[in-house]
Every structure is written in structure tokens, then in C-alpha cells.
Image: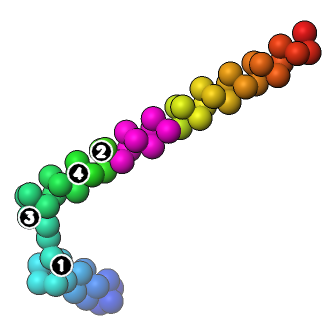
Amino acid sequence: MNKVSTYIRESYRELLEKVTWPTWMQLQQSTAIVLVSTLLIMLMVWVMDSLSNQLLQLIYSFFK
């Protein structure tokens, strides 16, 4: 039980003294980057899905 309490104490101390927390501006910039990246990746996946769907429909139409 002593090891657990030591771990919790040291973790708390590390969070307060050793971790560098981002400023509000850095947090907003990082969030904007993540959102834009997510939207771009989502758009790329949607385009690839649409193209593969059209290609498969074309291929299936040959066998009807």
C-alpha cells in the first residue's frame, strides 16, 4: 500500500512542477490544427470512397 501512495504523491508532484501546460492561445491553435486536419482527412476518405463506389458500379455493370 505504501508503493501506491508514493506513486500517487509523486505523480501529483510531477503534474504540478514538471509538466509544462499549454497557454490558452497554444491550446486554441492546436485545436484548430486538429479540426482542420480531421476535416481534410475526412474529405479525402469520402472522395476515395465515392471513386471506388463508382468504379465498382462500372465494373458490376459489365456483368449484368
Element marked by disc 3: loop
Residue at (40, 41) in percent of width and height: 40
| Residues at marks 3 and 2, CA–CA distance in whole angstroms | 18 Å
The tag on residue 31 is 4
* Magenta stretch, residue numbers: 37-44
Disc 3 vs disc 4: Cβ atoms closer than 8 Å? no
Q: Which corner quadrant of the image does residue 43 belong to?
A: top left
Pointer 3 or 2: first along the chain: 3
The tag on residue 35 is 2
Q: Look at mark 1 in the image and give the residue it sits on.
A: 19
Q: Residue at the left extreme?
A: 24
Q: Is residue 15 magenta?
A: no
Q: Is residue 35 left or right of residue 22?
A: right
The image shows residue 44, relative to residue 53, as above or below, that is: below
Disc 1 vs disc 3: Cβ atoms closer than 8 Å? no
| Residues at marks 1 and 2, CA–CA distance in whole angstroms | 25 Å
Q: Nearer the viewer, mark 1 or mark 4?
A: 4
Residue at (76, 24) in percent of width and height: 56
Pointer 1 or 4: first along the chain: 1
Q: Classify 10 Å Cα crowding around label 2: few (below 14), some (14-19), many (20 and above).
A: few
Q: Is any part of residue 5 visible from this angle?
A: no
Q: Classify 10 Å Cα crowding around label 1: few (below 14), some (14-19), many (20 and above).
A: few
Q: x, y percentage for residue 39?
A: 37, 39
The image shows residue 30, relative to residue 4, as above or below, that is: above
| Residues at marks 1 and 3, CA–CA distance in whole angstroms | 13 Å
The tag on residue 1 is none
| Residues at marks 1 and 4, CA–CA distance in whole angstroms | 19 Å
Element marked by disc 2: helix
| Residues at marks 4 and 2, CA–CA distance in whole angstroms | 6 Å
Q: Look at mark 3 in the image and give the residue it sits on.
A: 23
**Viewer-proximal residue, 45 or 2?**
45
